[in-house]
Structure formats: C-alpha cells, structure tokens
Image (tube, rainbow, N blue to C red):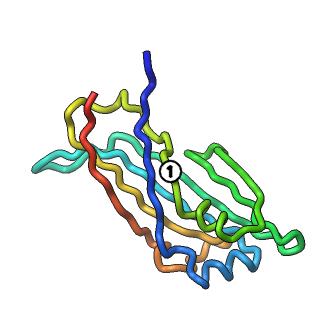
Amino acid sequence: MHCYQVLVSFELTDSLTDEVRQAILSGLNTTFTYTVELRLDVPAWVDRTIATATVTSSVEYYNLEREHHLVRMLDGRTEDAKVTPDEAVVRKWMTSFDRLPLFRTAVLEPNREYYVRVSATARPSNGSILWPFGSGTSGQAKFTFIR
C-alpha cells in the first residue's frame, strides 16, 4: 500500500520588516508559527476541517559568534536545524516553505474539492507581539483530489 501525501508550499512575503530584523539581531528568540488546515469545500454548508498541521520556524541570533541558530518544527517535532551567518538564509527559513508533506491522501475522497488554508502568527520569546501579523494573517489555495 502506498502512502501518498499532500505537499504544501507557501511563502509569507514582506514579513521580515526592519523592526523584526532588529528584534532578531538583538538576540530575541523569534518564532513564526504557521497553522495549516486541510479543509473540505462543502457548497452551501459549513466547510469541514479534515486535518491540521503546525509548522514553526524559529531563529535566535548569537552576537558573539555572529550566527543565527535556526530550528524548524512540524507538529512539535524538530524537522531540521542549522546555523548560518547569512540573513538571506534566515529570511527564506522563516518565511518560505516548499513541498512540505503535511497530510496523507488516505483521508481524501476522490473528485472532491479541497483547500489548504495557512494562518501565520509571530511571537518573540517574551510573548509580546511586535509586528502587525501577530494577530494572524492567512491565505488559501483550492485543489481537486483525483485518485
């Protein structure tokens, strides 16, 4: 039996403002949390959430080493970690995701309309919200599952 997955790609544009960059460079542990919902499009009714995944990307800058320590987690499990001095790598790590295998297709019905909705929040480690999308920004994309 094959285990096929729904691959999800998304990018949060214009989120690393000067204010956010300064917070990161001050050493403040910064986390972007993405809640990804797989939803069934139900015409003339309330759409149904089939599955939810949480992706987090964190960065902590160490001034003495001049390095960014990056961690990416999926549903609370560490998926990847790296260290880099390059701010461009940090920007991509925090805001860009390509072909994440988040959901199994076994939960999908053939020839039905689905969509993926992504909501983003940001948080420094002290719990205060520093930037506008802290209250949640979102986007979505529809697709038809064909087996």
In the displayed structure, would residue 1 be above or below residue 139?
A: above
Give amino acid for label 1: Asp
Quadrant of the rendered image containing residue 22: bottom right
Judged left or right of residue 24, residue 96 is left
Count of numbered circles on the image? 1
In the picture, the quarter occupied by the C terminus is top left
In the displayed structure, would residue 106 be above or below residue 76?
A: above
In the picture, the quarter occupied by the N terminus is top left
Judged left or right of residue 38, residue 126 is right
For the point 80% across and 67% down, which residue is it?
Answer: 67
In the displayed structure, would residue 96 be above or below residue 86?
A: above
Q: Residue furthest left?
A: 44
For the point 60% across and 84% down, which residue is it?
Answer: 18
Q: Position of residue 121 (x, y in %)?
A: 50, 66
Badge 1 density bin: few <14, some 14–19, many ≥20, Cα 10 Å? few
Q: Position of residue 42 (x, y in %)?
A: 17, 45
Mark 1 element type: strand
Q: Which residue is mark 1?
A: 98
Quadrant of the rendered image containing residue 71: bottom right
In the displayed structure, would residue 131 be above or below residue 57?
A: below
Q: Position of residue 111 (x, y in %)?
A: 20, 33
Judged left or right of residue 21, residue 100 is left
Q: Residue furthest right?
A: 64
Judged left or right of residue 41, residue 96 is right
Q: Position of residue 12 (x, y in %)?
A: 47, 66
For the point 27% across and 50% down, which residue is it?
Answer: 142
For the point 47% across and 62% down, which residue is it?
Answer: 11
